[in-house]
Image (cartoon, rainbow, N blue to C red):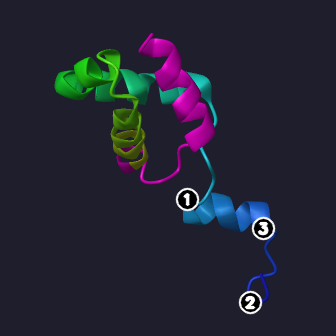
């Protein structure tokens, strides 16, 4: 900000630092992760709820760390019912 005079939101956008909270975009990523990890999905449905951390991590990896983790957790919990 000091060097360019740009606002924080402009810098965050330019540097790809904005968090993705759009549920539509995140649902698409979550669907891809669920499809790619059937073993972990079955483990979750079988009662091993800690595996959700793995799935969240995969979403974060695919979104290059930009996904809102709270939103991702909520979407995963809903889709894995």
Q: Mark 3 points at which residue?
A: 8
Q: Name the residue under label 1.
A: 16
Left or right side of 57 for 67: right
Helix, strand or loop at mark 1: loop
In which quadrant will I find the N terminus? Answer: bottom right
CA gap, disc 1 and disc 3: 12 Å
Q: Is the magenta stretch mostly helix, strand or loop?
A: helix
Helix, strand or loop at mark 3: helix
Using the image, determine if residue 63 lies above or below residue 33: below
Left or right side of 38 for 45: right
Span of residues in magenta: 61-81
Q: Residue 53 lies in what quarter of the image?
A: top left
Where residue 57 sits: x, y (%)? 38, 46
Neighbor class of circle 3 (other Cα within 10 Å; few <14, some 14-19, many 20+) is few
Query: What residue is shown at x 34% (from left), y 35% (from top)?
Result: 51
Q: Mark 2 points at which residue?
A: 3
* Residue nearer the viewer, 46 or 12: 46
The image's mark for residue 36 is none
CA gap, disc 3 and disc 2: 12 Å
Mark 3 or 2, closer to the camera: 3
């Amino acid at each position: 900000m000091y060097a360019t005079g740009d606002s924080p939101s402009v810098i965050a956008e330019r540097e790809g630092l904005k968090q993705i909270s759009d549920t539509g975009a995140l649902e698409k990523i979550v669907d891809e992760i669920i499809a790619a990890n059937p073993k972990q999905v079955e483990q979750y449905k079988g009662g091993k709820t800690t595996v959700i951390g793995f799935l969240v991590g995969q979403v974060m990896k695919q979104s290059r760390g930009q996904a809102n983790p709270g939103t991702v957790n909520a979407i995963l919990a809903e889709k894995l019912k």
